Structures are given as C-alpha cells and as structure tokens.
Image (cartoon, rainbow, N blue to C red):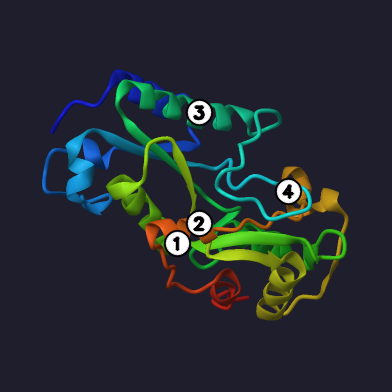
Amino acid sequence: MAAASPTLFRVSRSCSSVLVATAALIRGPSSRLAGPIAPAARSGPAATASSTVGTPWVPGRASVEADPLPLEGPVAERARTVNDLFGLVSRGVRATAVRMPRTVHDRGGFAGLLAERARRTGVAGYPGDGTQRWPAVHALDAAVPFRLALESAPAGTAWYAVADEGDAVRDIAAVIGRRLALPVRSVPEETFGPFGPIFAMDQPPSDVHTREALGWRPTRPGLLADLENLRP
C-alpha cells in the first residue's frame, strides 16, 4: 500500500465531519471501500470527500453541483475543509467531493431523530406550513457516487448524492405520525432546537448533472418509504 500524503491526513483530521476516502491511493486491484478501481483512476492518486455541509441552500431555485458551499455560519469550517482538499489538486491529487443531502437514511437516519422527538413529545410536528422540502438519499445509494467519482471524475469537481430532491416536511411528519399513531401538526420552529432553522428552510437540490455525467442511478427506497419501517 502506498503511503498517503501527510497533507491529505491533515485535511481529513481538520474537521470530524469530513471523511476522506483514499481508495485510489491503494495500489491493489480493488478497495473494500469503493469497489474495483477503474484503470483511469490507477494512473495517479485520487481522493474524494463527504461533507455534512450538505447541499447548499440557494434562494429561489434548486441548488446544483457548481454552487459554492457557505463560508459563513455554523458549517463554514466544514466547507473550508473541503476547499482545502481541492487545494491538493495543484499537487497532483485528483480530488473530488460528494455532497450529501440533509438526510442519509436507512430506516430513518436524520429523519429518525424527528421520530424520536415525536415519541418524546407525543406529536409528529413540522415547522411552518410544512411545504419546505428536504432532500434525502438511502445510505447504500449514497456510497455509489464515491466509487464513481474515484474512478473517473475530473479533479476539483463536486457531485450530489441526492435521490429524493425534496420531500415536504409535513409529508415526512405525516408518515411518522401515522406509523407511531401520533397527531400531526405544525409546531414552533424552536421545538426542534438547533435543527429548527434547517428544518424550516426550503432546500431542494438538483442532481441531474451527477446522474448524467457519472451514470449514477439510485435504486433503494426513498425516505418516505423507508420511514414506513417505523414501529411504535
């Protein structure tokens, strides 16, 4: 196995919310993390990152892969970490980033936290009128863009692992309420603590470019279908 760049490890350690996958630095026929590495990826070191910065919010439209990450606010340090990774491009590393949606689920995920809150409070709540949209992806579908990016994505590019471009939060709450036999209604944003402002924001992304360019096709259940596995 080839030694990874010390700079790469500094990037990966600079923020606990960023995972740097260095499968293409492994000089074997395959990596357990990313699957078989295509010949194009073996020609030089490559790295891809996942950031819980997520897909950025863009007022008035769905965000796309080319939109910049926020450099101010509570997730600014995470965005800077991804930018640090892109700084390795000038040193010959084919660095890419896979942006994750707000909810990466497998029987709930982040939305599962809403289910736990509903159990505690006795209400499946949502902020405002509930029309704001939350993007999501199943955990097993989310893994595939990492392999695809490592195999063939150009250096310095960002990609979206988004299967559901936007489920209305009141629809999420409706499934939680029905599965847990709880009332569903609008509640104050403050009910959700630090997640309230995020949950109240309409934030649809468009992953058309990722699907067309990388050939990614999510096949796992969507968030609403996954939440049907909830039990009282």
Amino acid type indicated by mark 4: Ile
In this view, the residue in front, 102 or 62, is 62
Element at badge 3?
helix
Q: Which residue is mark 3?
A: 83
Image coords of residue 119 (percent x, y): 70, 66
In this view, the residue in front, 12 or 38, is 38
User: Which comes sooner in the sequence, label 1 or label 4?
Assistant: 4
Marks 2 & 3, CB-CB < 8 Å contact = no
Marks 3 & 1, CB-CB < 8 Å contact = no
User: Which comes sooner in the sequence, label 2 or label 4?
Assistant: 4
User: Which comes sooner in the sequence, label 3 or label 4?
Assistant: 3
In this view, the residue in front, 54 or 156, is 156
Amino acid type indicated by mark 3: Asn
Can residue 139 be seen at all in this image of the molecule? no
User: Which comes sooner in the sequence, label 3 or label 1?
Assistant: 3
Query: Which mark is drawn over residue 198?
Result: 4
**Circle 2 or circle 3, nearest the eye:** 2
Q: Is residue 32 left or right of residue 136?
A: left
Q: Is residue 135 left or right of residue 51?
A: right
Disc 2/disc 4 C-alpha distance (Å): 25 Å
Can residue 48 be seen at all in this image of the molecule? yes
**Circle 2 or circle 4, nearest the eye:** 2
Q: Which residue is mark 2?
A: 209
In this rendering, the answer to whether 25 lies above or below 186 is: above
Quadrant in which the N terminus appears: top left
In this view, the residue in front, 74 or 164, is 164
Image coords of residue 109 (percent x, y): 55, 59
Element at badge 4?
helix
Element at badge 1?
helix
